[in-house]
Each structure stands twice: as structure tokens, then as C-alpha cells.
Image: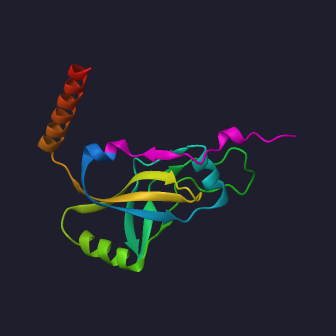
Amino acid sequence: MAKDKSRFSNDVHIKNRKARHEYEFVDTYEAGIVLKGTEIKSIREGKVNLLDGYCFFNKGELILKGIHISPYSQSSFYNHESTRERKLLLHKRELVKIKSKLDEKGLTLIPSRLYINKRGFAKVEIALAKGKKLHDKRDSIKEKDMKRELERIKF
């Protein structure tokens, strides 16, 4: 009996598109993520939602909360909880740097992208971000529309 390998992909790039609209990115970091076996299978199928995700520090560790990884459909009773807290893996010096920047007023840490690297490990790109005001959002929409119009004129 041949297994269907086409549903799993090593070319997974899940983006949090709403984050670019809601926040202004100050700095980005690449972090590993601690997963269970069924979670990585769901990620390879592309069943992840990053929209409500955020990061916080707990006892010196960086924790990712609020992302939804759907339960793996082929699993029996060893399936994972879909919205559990997941530990992020960063170097100690990066954690100290992020912690000091988060203490500044108005900054938050959000997941902007989840992908699988060349070695097959799941990575999360987290962004140190500052919330945009309403007029900032309008300006970014205006710039995007102008770029789109210029592209139409060129072609």
C-alpha cells in the first residue's frame, strides 16, 4: 500500500498578512519552535493560523501563544491541543536583547511568518512591532495603491 506523500510539503510559507497592516515592524528575529509530532504534520499540510498570535516572556523563556495549528486528521488519540502555548528557541543574547526592547513603551512581539527551512525544521519569524495609528494605516494604503497604479502604467 503506497502512502500519499503529496499532502506533505517542505515548501511551507505561512504569512501573517494582517500584521503588516496593523503594526510597523522595528526588528525581526528567526526562532525555532518546540512542536509535537502531530503539529509538524499539520504545519506541512499548511493548516496554521497566525492572526491572533503573540509572544511573551515566562520565567526567562519566550512563549508563543494564540496561533492555531489544526489537529492532524490522520492521528488517533495522540493528537495535540490546537491553541496550546509553544516555547520559542532563541540564543540567550537574543532573548536579553528582545526583553530589553520589550520594556520600552508601545512595543510588542508578534509572529509574522512560519516556514520550514532547508533542513526540515519549522521556524517562526517574530517581529518586534509598534502599533500603527489610523492615519499611519491610511498612509500605507495610499502608498500601496500608488505603487499598484505605477505598475499598471508601466505594463
Image position, residue 60 (x, y; %): 40, 79
Residue 147 placement: quadrant: top left
- Position of 140 with respect to 16 (left or right) is left
Q: Nearer the viewer, residue 103 or 15?
A: 15
Quadrant placement of the C terminus: top left
Is 75 inside the magenta-drawn segment? no
- Position of 104 with respect to 108 (left or right) is left
Quadrant placement of the N terminus: top right
Q: Nearer the viewer, residue 13 or 74?
A: 13
Residue, x 25% and y 71% (percent of image)?
101
Residue, x 75% and y 39% (percent of image)?
4
**Residue lying farthest right?**
1
Tell me the colour scheme of the image: rainbow
- Number of marks: 0
Residue, x 36% and y 42% (percent of image)?
17
**Residue lying farthest front?**
154
Image position, residue 78 (x, y; %): 72, 57
Residue 146 drawn above or below residue 109:
above
Is 10 inside the magenta-drawn segment? yes
Q: Which residues are magenta?
A: 1-18
Residue 4 drawn above or below residue 72:
above
Image position, residue 79 (x, y; %): 68, 55
Image position, residue 53 (x, y; %): 41, 54
Residue 106 drawn above or below residue 153:
below
**Residue lying farthest left?**
135
Residue 152 placement: quadrant: top left
Residue, x 45% and y 58% (percent of image)?
124
- Position of 72 with respect to 114 (left or right) is right
